[in-house]
Image (cartoon, rainbow, N blue to C red):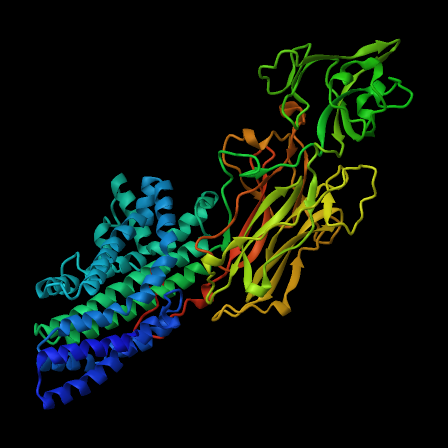
Amino acid sequence: MNLTSAFWILLFFSLVKAQLDPASLVQIIATSIALVKYVADIWKAISNETIKIEGELGEALPDLTKILENKELQNMTLEWTNLMKYSADRKVLSQFAAMNARLDGMNQKLSSLELSLSRLVRQLPVTVRFEVGLDRILTLIRPIHSLYDNFRLYQQERDQIEKLTLEDFALTIVSHSTTSIRSLLWQLHDSVLPGPFSLEWTSPPNSTSIRGRRKIRKRRFILEGIFHQFKNYLEVYNGELCNLTKSPQQLIYDLYNLLALTDAKGYAMMQFSWMLLKIYEKGDFTRESDLARQEFEKRVTEKAQVARSVISQMSNWYDRCINEKPVENETYIQFTEVLQGYVVNEVDLNTENTCKEECKSYTAAQEFGCHKKTFCNSEKRCDQGKLHGCTFFEADSSVCMSTSPHRRYDWIEYKSGRLIGQKTECRTGNTKRADSWWRFLYHCSNCICLCDQPGPRSDRYVSLRPAVADVLSGNIVTGVRFVKEGRVVHIQIQEGKSLPRGSVNASSMQWRPVEPITPNDDSTALINKYSDYATLTYEERALDLDHLMAPQGHVVIGLRFRRLGGHINLEMQVAPIEFFNGWVDYGSAVWIGNDNTPASEESRKQVQLHNPDTPLRTPSRPLEDAGDNEYVEFQASSIEKDVGQTTIPFLDAQAVIPQPPMWITGIALVHKGNPGYGGYVAFKVATYNMTDHILVPNSKSVSDPEKEINTV
C-alpha cells in the first residue's frame, strides 16, 4: 500500500466516525485533495535522489524550501482541523513519517563515521582533542539525534500518544532554551563557522599570562572551525590515520554529511513543531517558520562552502596500519629463502678444492662439494643453487642450527665472543662447530654467502594473472590484499556492484577467487617470458612502488603485475563511470601503469634498506617511507642481526577496504618501515574525489564564510 492509498483509507474512516453533513463532506474532500498533493510534494523533495545530503543537499534545497515556505499547508491543515475536529495532528504526524526513509538511508551510510570519530577521539591527546573540538561536536549532535528518535517513535505510536506529549515535544523543539533544537543547531554551526559569540570563550588579546596565552591560542583554533581544525590535525598526525577506516578526504566528507544530515533532521522537526502548534491554535507561526527556513538555507550554504574548500585540499588515499600482533599468512606474507645466509668453506667454492683465494673473491659462485664431510654435512646444502656476496667474519665458531622450517641457523658465536644473530637457548644437539683450518700456507676459511636456490622450501613466485572484477554483474574493485596460494603470491581483489554517487552495494561485495598456479622449481629450467608467474632471483628481485591514479571520471576494475625491465610492476585497469547512475563503460576500459625504469629519463630510485633486521622485531609501528616512482629489492636480512635468514621486506596481507565502501580511483604500492628493519610492502587505495559534488546553493544573502573567517 502506498502513502496516498493509506491516507485516503485513514480519511474515509475518519469521515465515517465524524458523521458530517454533505456540504462539509464536499469541502473536506476538496481540501484533502490539495493536502495530499502538497504532502506528496514534500515527500518527493525529501526522498528525491538529489537530497542525498552527500554533496547534493544544496541542489535540492530550492525545491524543499519552496514547498515548506508555502503557507497553504498551514491554512489547509487548520481548515481541515476546524471541519473535522478529529486527529488532524495525527495525520500531519503520519505524513512526516514518510520523510524518514531517506534520512534513515543516510544514517546507515554514516554509521561507520561515528565509529571512526570515536576511535579518533580516543587516540587524541586531551589538549588536541579539546582544540579540534570533536568532543563538542559529538556532544551537540547526540541530543538532536535523540530527539529525532523520539519524533520517529511518536510517528509510529501516533494513535496512542497524548496531545499534551506532542505539544510539549513541539515547544521543546522551538523554545529559546540553550538545549532546544534551534539553539543546538546554531551551536553546532558555530563549531563549523564560529560567529562573534565564540569570542566570549577567549581572553583579551593583550593578556600576557601563561593561561592567557593558552586562551589566545584557543581563540585561534575556535575561529578556524571544525573542518579546518580537523584538516590541521590530519596533516600533522598523518602517520596515525591508518587506524581509521577511510581516507582523510572521505572522513571529512562524511563529517560534512553528518552535520548536514543533523541539520536536516532538526529543520524537519522545527517545521513539524510550527505546524503542530498552529493546529493546536497556539498561534500562526508563519513568520517563525519563514525565519527557520532562512536560517536553514544559511547554515547549509555556509557549511557546504567551507567543506568544499577543505575537502579539496585533503588526501583521498587510504591504507591500513601494520598490525602490531603479526600472524604469518593473516596479517603478513613473506617470501622464503630467496636469498639466505649460508656458511660454506672456500675449499668447496671451486672445482680444484683450493684455498688460494679469499671469501670476498667469490661474488658469484657455486658449491661443488662437502670437503671431508665437515660442517657442511650438518646443514641444508646449497649445492643446487648459486652463492653471492661471500664474506669472512672469523675463523672458528659455534652455530645454532635452527628448527624453524625456513631458517638454517638461529645464531653464530665466534671464538672471540662475537655474536651474529639473536642468541637464544639452542636445543640440545643443535649446536655445531664450524672451524676454519690451515692447508700449508693457505687458510681455508669459512665464508658466509647468500644462497639463491629455488626448491620446495623457497616461496619466491608472483602471479602475473590479472585480477578483474565481474563485468557481467556490473562490479568494480572495492578492496585489495596480498594472498599466498600454493607458494605463489597473488593480488586478490574484493568486488562489488557500483551504485550511483560513489556508492557500492555492500551486500554484493565478495573476494574474487585467485587462480591456482603450480610453479616450476627447477632452477636450470628456462623460464618462459610469457608464463603467468614471475620468479624472484638474485638478478631479478625488484618490485616497483607507485601511486597509480585513474583519469577523472574513471574507477578501478582490475589489477595485475607485469614484468618491466627485470622488475615486477603494478598495473590497474580503469573504466569510465557515470556519477549519477553508477553505470560503468567496460568497453572503454584500459590498463595503466608507470613505465619508468632505472634507465628512464625520469629514473626510478631504489629504496635502500640498510642493515635490516626482520620486521617482526621492529620496536614501533612502521610508517610509509617510500612509494612513488621508486623500487625495493627483496633481499636477505642483516647478517649481523639475523644471520641473513629472512627474506625482506614482508608483504602486508591485511585487506584495504574503505568503510563504507566507495568507488576506488587509485591503487598504490608503498614501503613502510623503520630505520634498521626490513619493513613491509603494502597496498593503498584512493577513494573517489567528491569535491566537485558538494554543491553550494546560490544565495546572494550569504557572505563568503572563508572571507569571514580570515577577517575576524
In the rendered image, residue 248, in percent from the top left (x then y), is placed at 45, 52
Horizontal side of residue 249 vs 122, given as left or right: right
Q: Is residue 14 above or below residue 632?
A: below
Count how many numbered circles sit on residues in the image: 0
Place residue 257 in its image quadrant: bottom left
In the rendered image, the residue lying farthest to the bottom is: 23
In the rendered image, residue 174, in percent from the top left (x then y), is placed at 16, 65
Q: Quadrant of the N terminus?
A: bottom left
The residue nearer to you, when weighing 286 against 133, is 286
Q: Is residue 155 above or below residue 287?
A: above
Q: Is residue 324 above or below residue 142?
A: above
Horizontal side of residue 518 vs 556, given as left or right: right
The residue nearer to you, when weighing 712 against 477, is 477
Q: Evaluate whether residue 65 shows in this view.
A: no
Horizontal side of residue 292 vs 677, given as left or right: left
Q: Evaluate whether residue 141 shows in this view.
A: yes
At a point 55% along the width and 65% down the height, the residue shown is 474
In the rendered image, residue 268, in percent from the top left (x then y), is placed at 24, 68
At a point 82% along the width and 26% down the height, the residue shown is 362
Q: Quadrant of the C terminus?
A: bottom left
In the rendered image, the residue lying farthest to the right is: 352
At a point 74% along the width and 33% down the height, the residue shown is 455
Place residue 288 in its image quadrant: bottom left
In the rendered image, residue 611, in percent from the top left (x then y), is placed at 64, 29
Horizontal side of residue 71 vs 411, given as left or right: left
The residue nearer to you, when weighing 664 against 610, is 664
Q: Is residue 104 above or below residue 32?
A: above
